[in-house]
Image (cartoon, coloured by chain):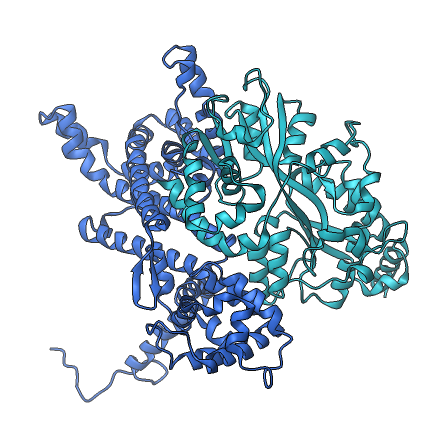
Chain colours: A blue, B cyan
């Protein structure tokens, strides 16, 4: 009979309680493990988490107006934007002081540009006013209401002051509203005029075309992956090289090659005309539109579909198919009921990879997409590089990120993320 | 000891090969940002190579000019400016200057006078559109057409672009409102002097888009200056818009069956800025480079390699023949008198105000 006296604590060799000693060594192990992956953690933090956090904050941040024009923002608090009347003299005087300081610090155009996103004309209004205001004596030159209106009649428009007030809070929903084709006005959120709505359409197009690309990749990739997994080693290796070769070729080279292939005076059209399948006057338009983007991107993303499918299919024992057939299944039944269900995790992994890559694609649509085949990322690039509306670009990027996360979550609910395999 | 000695000798060798010991307060390496391609090449041969030979400075090239404003803003926010001299167009230069991202340059003390002693401010004249901007070339955006695909009456007027009856076939335009809206109004019968007044109104904008609607299905919309030359060479389009230097190289260097329409060319300037906030050594070097690269002879030299007009009045008579082809370059300049008379001047202030608004409208119209 074994008895463990409850009043006696188990001790380790150095005389410490065993429990304590165990937890200590576990803790040490954890710290060691953490130290080993520390470089990676720091890298991910600096190169991945921080940029995303800064993007998220940029999409709502709006301190430029209140920082550059502090007195004006303060003075505008008491002005009723919906009254339809111009603000009173103290607001104009505060503005004269602010714009003078801003002009001296050379920050007036930045604010002008910021407000110009909301109402065209404010950029030059600020520029012109600042040029004059630099020479003013704020103490003695008042009153400023008539003076400012004389400099530019824009200061006599209620709408300009409404824009200024609406976009003065430190945090704004304005960028997100713009990102979904709405705008922030003095009365609240409102739809953009119809001739300026473009972003929702681009979001829709990005989603739909990414889905089409993913499905074409499944259709084209599945037979190739099946061949790779089932051919004898020698042929399979050759085929593998054929799959990988384009994968190793520069993205730009592959995209430009499609340009040569698909254009109206290109290889495919030339062949079709020579075979008299298409008349010379009615050459097919296959580039600078949706077709161009879908064809080129399907080709570019195909390896991302084939490789996970292949690694999953390799693990499916061929004996299962033979067993099914020996039990009387036709070729189709054996494939559809036995083989296909086991290959689904590969399709899942490939689809997620391809879809997520496609939704953020930029360079290929830019080159072959014309105007009908560009994605939301092309618009984000425009706002980062050309219009410098980084807030709007950040809001668009955030929406795209959330859309991907939501889709990932739905996928997990419907298919189950455990069902995704990259191999093994 | 030996090591220090080696460094000392190398350093002094570099200095002696340079102009004088006075240069020791300037950095010996600089990054110059430009547009790449044939244009950067012309700068390399006309400016960089002689400057390096004269001073021993190592020049690094960065082809990022198309995104210069965004990148300079980001560098300014990060407080780490890695560029020394940047080649930009006039409009971005004005914006950089207004935002305090470019340093102000006094033409008369910081730039070389003309050989006859005319101060730089007079020599550049109206081209000095901003306090921070030293103009280098005048370029234009204009049309080229395939001589073999336009029938018996080659187009001589920019409105041929809108005339799909006489000139059936595809044409290429930039997918931005700038220039396309002006051409549309011009060919819809608006006088050159009134275009921007009309374009400032809703009705005028709708009118421009309606005019563009008439050719929308015949247009291949492009985003970069290299697209149209390629499309013309492939016969994908019968006419298309791009920069005049690109068309020159397509016609004269590559001998393609293409000719130019100078009518309605939209002129613009391109030149240098120096980012604000450089260290004294780097700033001194950048200024020294600018002084060298924008003198009368250097600007005239650039025209040997590319068909853009020098921005100095005193350079124009010095423009000679193409370095490799031996063609007389003067008639190929956008500033040649007969070309100049048909030009259209862009309004920078208008586009500073309306670009965001009209771009949204234009893109929405394109997507329709």
Q: Nearer the viewer, residue B293 or B356?
A: B356
Q: Residue at x 47, y 26 (%)?
A: B170
Asked where in the image residue B323 lies, by quadrant, the reply is top right
Residue A252 sits above or below residue B13 on the image: above
Q: Residue at x 56, y 29 (%)?
A: B230
Q: Position of residue B100 (x, y in %)?
A: 63, 66
Q: Nearer the viewer, residue A167 or B183?
A: B183
| Residue A126 in sight | yes
Asked where in the image residue A233 lies, by quadrant, the reply is top left
Residue B60 sits above or below residue A36 on the image: above
Q: Position of residue A106 (x, y in %)?
A: 60, 70
Q: Nearer the viewer, residue A343 or B214?
A: B214
Residue A146 located left or right of residue A183: right
Residue B262 located left or right of residue A152: right
Looking at the rendered image, the quarter that the C terminus of chain B falls into is top left
Asked where in the image residue A104 lies, by quadrant, the reply is bottom right
Q: Residue at x 43, y 26 (%)?
A: A262
Q: Position of residue A103 (x, y in %)?
A: 60, 72
| Residue A381 in sight | no
Residue A79 located left or right of residue A320: right
Residue B99 sits above or below residue B328 on the image: below
């Amino acid at each position: 009979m074994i008895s463990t006296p409850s009043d006696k604590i188990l001790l380790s060799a150095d005389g410490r309680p065993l429990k304590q000693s165990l937890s200590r060594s576990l803790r040490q192990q954890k710290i060691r493990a953490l130290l080993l992956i520390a470089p990676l953690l720091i890298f991910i933090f600096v190169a991945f988490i921080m940029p995303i956090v800064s993007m998220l904050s940029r999409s709502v941040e709006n301190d430029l107006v209140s920082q550059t024009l502090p007195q004006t923002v303060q003075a505008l608090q008491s002005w009723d934007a919906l009254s339809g009347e111009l603000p009173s003299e103290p607001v104009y005087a505060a503005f004269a002081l602010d714009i003078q300081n801003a002009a001296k610090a050379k920050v007036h155009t930045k604010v002008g540009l910021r407000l110009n996103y909301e109402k065209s004309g404010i950029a030059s209004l600020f520029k012109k006013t600042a040029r004059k205001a630099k020479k003013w004596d704020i103490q003695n030159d008042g009153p400023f209401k008539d003076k400012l209106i004389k400099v530019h009649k824009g200061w006599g428009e209620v709408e300009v002051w409404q824009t200024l007030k609406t976009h003065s809070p430190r945090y704004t929903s304005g960028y997100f509203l713009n990102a979904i084709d709405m705008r922030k006005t003095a009365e609240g959120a409102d739809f953009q005029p119809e001739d300026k709505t473009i972003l929702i359409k681009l979001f829709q197009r990005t989603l739909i075309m990414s889905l089409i690309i993913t499905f074409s990749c499944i259709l084209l990739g599945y037979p190739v992956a099946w061949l790779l997994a089932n051919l004898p080693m020698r042929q399979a290796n050759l085929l593998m090289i054929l799959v990988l070769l384009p994968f190793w070729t520069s993205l730009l080279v592959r995209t430009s090659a499609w340009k040569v292939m698909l254009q109206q005076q290109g290889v495919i059209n030339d062949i079709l005309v020579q075979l008299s399948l298409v008349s010379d006057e009615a050459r097919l338009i296959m580039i600078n539109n949706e077709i161009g983007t879908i064809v080129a991107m399907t080709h570019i993303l195909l390896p991302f579909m084939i490789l996970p499918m292949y690694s999953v299919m390799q693990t499916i024992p061929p004996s299962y198919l033979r067993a099914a057939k020996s039990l009387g299944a036709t070729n189709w039944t054996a494939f559809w009921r036995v083989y296909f269900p086991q290959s689904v995790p590969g399709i899942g992994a490939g689809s997620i990879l391809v879809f997520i890559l496609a939704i953020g694609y930029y360079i290929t649509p830019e080159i072959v997409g014309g105007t009908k085949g560009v994605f939301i990322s092309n618009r984000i690039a425009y706002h980062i590089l050309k219009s410098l509306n980084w807030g709007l670009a950040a809001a668009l990027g955030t929406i795209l990120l959330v859309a991907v996360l939501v889709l990932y979550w739905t996928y997990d609910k419907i298919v189950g993320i455990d069902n995704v395999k990259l191999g093994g | 000891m030996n090591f220090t000695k080696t460094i000392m000798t190398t350093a002094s060798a570099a200095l002696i090969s340079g102009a004088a010991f006075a240069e020791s307060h300037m950095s010996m390496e600089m990054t110059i940002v430009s547009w790449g391609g044939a244009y950067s090449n012309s700068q390399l041969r006309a400016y960089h190579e002689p400057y390096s030979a004269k001073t021993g400075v190592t020049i690094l090239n960065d082809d990022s000019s198309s995104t210069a404003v965004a990148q300079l803003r980001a560098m300014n926010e990060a407080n780490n400016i890695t560029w020394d001299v940047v080649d930009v167009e006039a409009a971005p230069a004005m914006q950089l200057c207004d935002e305090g991202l470019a340093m102000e340059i006094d033409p008369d003390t910081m730039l070389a006078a003309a050989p006859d002693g005319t101060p730089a401010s007079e020599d550049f004249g109206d081209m000095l559109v901003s306090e921070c901007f030293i103009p280098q070339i005048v370029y234009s955006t204009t049309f080229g057409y395939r001589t073999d695909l336009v029938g018996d009456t080659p187009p001589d007027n920019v409105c041929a672009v809108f005339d799909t009856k006489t000139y059936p076939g595809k044409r290429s335009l930039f997918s931005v409102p700038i220039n396309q809206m002006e051409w549309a109004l011009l060919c819809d019968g608006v006088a050159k002097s009134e275009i921007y007044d009309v374009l400032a109104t809703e009705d005028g904008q709708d009118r421009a888009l309606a005019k563009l609607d008439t050719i929308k299905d015949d247009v291949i919309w492009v985003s970069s200056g290299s697209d149209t030359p390629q499309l013309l060479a492939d016969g994908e389009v019968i006419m298309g818009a791009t920069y005049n230097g690109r068309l020159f190289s397509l016609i004269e260097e590559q001998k393609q069956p293409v000719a130019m329409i100078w009518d309605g060319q939209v002129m613009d300037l391109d030149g240098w800025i120096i980012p604000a906030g450089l260290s004294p050594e780097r700033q001194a070097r950048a200024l020294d480079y600018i002084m060298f690269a924008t003198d009368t002879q250097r600007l005239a030299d650039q025209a040997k390699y590319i068909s853009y007009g020098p921005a100095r009045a005193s350079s124009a008579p010095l423009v000679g023949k193409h370095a490799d082809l031996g063609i007389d370059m003067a008639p190929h300049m956008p500033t040649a008198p007969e070309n100049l008379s048909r030009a259209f001047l862009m309004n920078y202030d208008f586009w500073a105000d309306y670009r965001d608004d009209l771009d949204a409208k234009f893109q929405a119209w394109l997507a329709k």
